Image: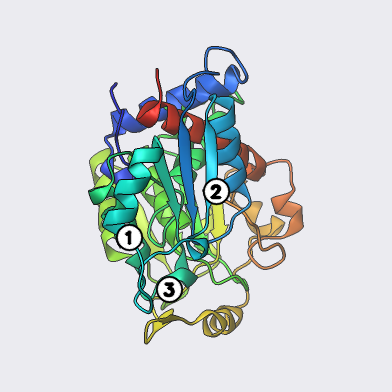
Amino acid sequence: MDLYGRDLICTQDWTFEELMAVLELAAKMKRERFSERWSSVLKHKTFFMFFYNPSVRTRQSFECAATELGGHAQYLEPRAMRLKTAASAGETVEDAAKVMSRYAAGIGIRILEDQVPYYGAGDELLLEYAYWADVPIINMADDRFHPCQGLADVMGWAEWYGQGPGRPDYTALQGKKLLLTWASGALARSWCSVQEALLIASRFGMHITLAYPEGYDLDSQVIAWTKAHCAAHGTSFEIIHDPESGYEGAHIVYSRNWVSPQAYQDGMFQKQSEIQKALAYPGWTTTAERMARTDNAIFTHPMPVDRGSEVTDEVASGPRSVIYDVAENRLHVQKAILALTMGNL
């Protein structure tokens, strides 16, 4: 399948067959890590990593991915560049994208909730870069979507229900129940990871229960897409507003804090207000007692984990936690994405 030159802003933009091409290559690369077969895929090629927000896993995994493919990942910070903003003069997106396209084989951008004036502005920036750039734009997490995380999630789940590391079985996920539940926490997280999880799980034929307190609705377009995917597979999608009932019969539990739709006021992200609001909803922590009511579910989380608020240590570090498997899969999924969109396969 020819994916050379393609942007990856959201998994929704790619067909199921295209996503499977990434996942199948990722599993092969995981089984054959450090093989000379992959060591020259990005030979002499540079991938620009444009970080409006810092990270742990994203920077490390992309740098490792480029290195293992024989290329180079270059770290860029917007504050160290003369870029045009609402308050200052500088290079436009058009100029920056066109110049960077002359240097690099691809551009990754990470821009989250506290670096944008309103919900969706980060995603709009990636789309603008994609419009002007002549090389692939890879979403390293924006305020709406996180495609690399979504692919790493589903790969980890399919490995657990398949034959283990590097041997996922995606058919085994069909008919499984995902509980995606809001959780208390003091990190005021964006919607991107949980929204990608909804889109991915629904495309792989899973039943979905989305649980959150009243007032924490997610993007209506994402909910509509999720419902459509579930309808196409004949699976269920339900939204509940209590922290208990969704655990019944769940096979995968995903517990994550996210902000409310009121997180932006007058062009500013209201972080402290969102934290105070979230802490006013106790009782939404994933515990061993709640996991015991599932169908022997695994626990998943994109990290960083707000331990004690989103989930207890007993669950996060327990024998049925896949948080580290999923984190590892960011490397393999991203190697596959880089190889297919800008490599010499």
Of tags 2 and 1, the one toward the viewer is 2
> Of the residues under marks 2 and 3, which one precedes in the sequence?
2
Graded by Cα atoms within 10 Å as few (under 14), some (14 to 19) or many (20 or more), the crowding at tag 1 reads some
Label 3, secondary structure: give it. Answer: loop
Mark 3 and mark 1: Cα distance apart in space: 25 Å
Question: Can residue 330 be seen here?
Answer: no
Label 2, secondary structure: give it. Answer: strand
Query: What's the mark number on residue 75?
Result: 2
Please give left or right for residue 115 compared with residue 62 in the image.
left
Q: Residue at x 25, y 57 (%)?
A: 224
Quickly name the residue at label 1: 125
Of tags 3 and 1, the one toward the viewer is 1
Q: Residue at x 31, y 30 (%)?
A: 18
Name the image quarter holding the N terminus.
Answer: top left
Marks 3 and 2: in contact by CB < 8 Å? Answer: no
Is residue 240 placed above or below 159 in the rendered structure?
Answer: below
Mark 2 and mark 3: Cα distance apart in space: 34 Å
From the top left corner, tell me how far across and down residue 173 is, in percent: 45, 34
Question: Can residue 179 be seen here?
Answer: yes
> Of the residues under marks 2 and 1, which one precedes in the sequence?
2
From the top left corner, tell me how far across and down residue 334 is, in percent: 49, 35
Name which residue type carries label 2.
Tyr
Observer-nearest of 103 and 4: 103
Quickly name the residue at label 3: 216
> Of the residues under marks 3 and 1, which one precedes in the sequence?
1
Label 1, secondary structure: give it. Answer: helix
Graded by Cα atoms within 10 Å as few (under 14), some (14 to 19) or many (20 or more), the crowding at tag 2 reads few
Q: Residue at x 43, y 73 (%)?
A: 216
Name which residue type carries label 1.
Leu
Name which residue type carries label 3.
Tyr
